[in-house]
Amino acid sequence: MTTAYKNRIQEFKVALSEENINLKTLRELCFSGIPFEGGIRALCWKILLNYLPLDQTLWESFLKKQREVYTQFLREMIIQPGIAKANMGLSREDVTMEDHPLNPNPDSRWNNYFKDNEILLQIDKDVRRLYPDMAFFQRPTQYPCQLILDPQNDYETLRRRVEQTTLKSQTVNRNRSGVTNVSSPGKSLNLYPSNEYEVLPSGSEAHWEVVERILFIYAKLNPGIAYVQGMNEVVGPIYYTFATDPNSQWKEHAEADTFFCFTNLMSENRDNFIKSLDDSQCGITYKMESVYSMLRERDLELYLKLEEQNIKPQYFTFRWLTLLLSQEFLLPDVIRIWDTLFSDQDRFHLLILVCCAMLILIRDNLLAGDFTVNMRLLQDYPISDVNTILIKAKDLRDTS
């Protein structure tokens, strides 16, 4: 570790030791990247995502309350419905029209259960393949949720729900346009190849199962948006950062803390996932066009070349913007980009600058390429050094 890096860690420690944290100072420090050592990054993200209050004297009571709230969510949205399902129709005499699976009432318990299963299946399918190039999400967590795994709770777990549903029903793919791609029950039997996940011993749960629970509870609490493919890519880096925190007191509560930080981030980013808002000023179409508007101002020649080739911003910036570049780079690089994004007060404007910088940095390749070559470049971005991209984005911001 170099002397300069040690000094930088010390600067963070000083900033984070203040009873009332100076957010402006912390933002400036975080913009150039946050050290992992000592759990500094995880702590800074919790502050930058408006989860932890700036007054440190409030942290203990605040965290206790938030974690109790999350435990209540688990009880209300996973355990109690699981118990109710386990008890529904135990004997034929118990079955009334109210709790009959064929009850046409949209508010019936069974109807809600089936709707939840559609969402759960999509979440399950997505989280199992989260960052497949690294083993972390398949490994068991050091801190499995004891409430969920408590043998005293005789209920249908999310894992059991998925296993039963994939065997009994059709598989439903849900994207931003709604429910699509309904496959036959025969296909659903092979939904997960045997090598895709390892069966963990009793009392254990994999990190992907924790992420699944976070997304399921988010979907239940936000029925207007529920779950849309891609949210798994947004929650993944946050959970990874908190679940690898070297400080075990924080790491133990990675699930609850991730849930609230993800919820806060989605409150700023959720409009990108709502199709009906696409063409509004807060929707994704406007943001994609903003990337090209900025490019036109900064590099007219490159802008005209992309226009001439009819390469529309939605062909590549849709994924860049909605998933905060989480699919374009390796996880450590995504985390480094997010250090800078989270530190900026206007983080989504900065994201547009980063996208514009990514285009300008490969301008020579794009100016020389035809449509096919350029589409390949944009969908499999060639530069892996994210610091070069962030420096260029800062230059664009400082010269605007």
Image (tube, rainbow, N blue to C red):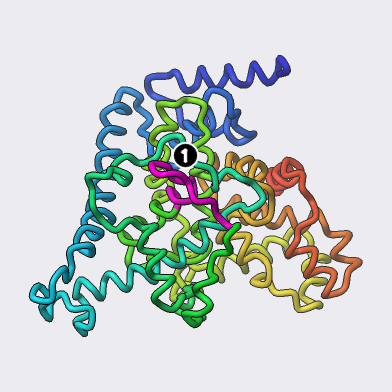
Numbered label tally? 1
Q: Position of residue 295 (x, y in %)?
A: 72, 62
The amino acid at mark 1 is Thr
Q: Position of residue 230 (x, y in %)?
A: 53, 62
Q: Seen in the image, is 304 located left or right of residue 398? A: right
Q: Seen in the image, is 124 located left or right of residue 90? A: right
Which residue occupies 38% across, 35% down?
253
* Quadrant placement of the N terminus: top right
Of residue 373 and residue 83, the one placed in the foreground of this image is 83
Q: Would you place residue 312 above or below residue 327 in this image?
A: below
To which quarter of the image does residue 156 belong?
A: bottom left
Q: Main secondary structure of the magenta part?
A: loop
SS assignment at label 1 = loop
Q: Position of residue 273 (x, y in %)?
A: 48, 66
Q: Would you place residue 183 above or below residue 355 in this image?
A: below
To which quarter of the image does residue 165 belong?
A: bottom left
Does 57 appear in magenta?
no
Residue identifier under label 1: 141
Specify the farthest residue to the right. Answer: 368
Which residue occupies 88% across, 66% down?
367
Q: Crowding near pointer 1: few (<14 within 10 Å), some, many (20+)?
A: some
Specify the farthest residue to the left. Answer: 93
Start-end of magenta stretch: 196-211
Does 204 appear in magenta?
yes
Of residue 25 and residue 382, the one placed in the foreground of this image is 382
Which residue occupies 47% across, 22% down?
16
